[in-house]
Amino acid sequence: MTNEQAERFATWHNAPRLRGRLEGHRLSPIATVPEPPPLEPAHEGTTYYLAHVDANRARHSLLPPPVEPPAP
């Protein structure tokens, strides 16, 4: 392994990543998303919305976030 390959691997390995899951799709256990996760990723022509994030994973839903009512 060259120094350049080792540096690229170390950069990839040390980048913060989360396990990712799309509603309706079971991603493989090694599927990861960057941290912070994207708010509206698209997969196979479908837009998903960030539903939940914790220290270990990010979950995306088909439902858009709720709309806040207008201020009185």
Image: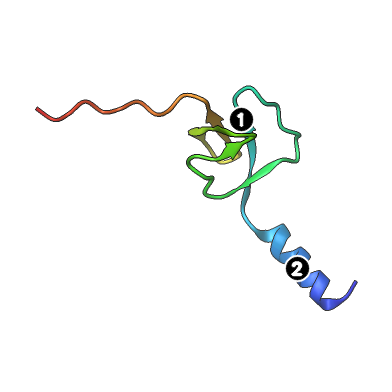
In which quadrant of the rendered view does residue 7 lie?
A: bottom right
Discs 2, 1 touching: Cβ within 8 Å:
no
Q: Is residue 44 toward the left or the right of residue 66 in the image?
A: right
- Binning the other alpha carbons within 10 Å of mark 2 as few (below 14), some (14 to 19) or many (20 upward) gives few
- Circle on res. 22: 1
Question: What crowding class fits label 1: few (fewer than 14 Cα within 10 Å), some (14-19), or many (20 or more)?
Answer: some
- Quote the CA–CA distance across marks 2 and 1: 28 Å
- Locate the N terminus by quadrant: bottom right
The first of marks 2 and 1 along the sequence is 2
Say which residue label 2 marks: 8
* Mark 2 residue type: Arg
Seen in the picture, residue 44 relative to 23 is either above or below; the reply is below
* Residue at 49% across, 33% down: 49
Residue at 80% across, 76% down = 4
Question: Residue 35, how many percent across, how many down?
Answer: 56, 50
Image spot of residue 14 (x, y percent): 68, 60
State the SS at label 2. helix
Q: Secondary structure at mark 1?
A: strand
| Above or below: residue 3 compared with residue 25 | below
- Check disc 1 and give the amino acid type: Leu
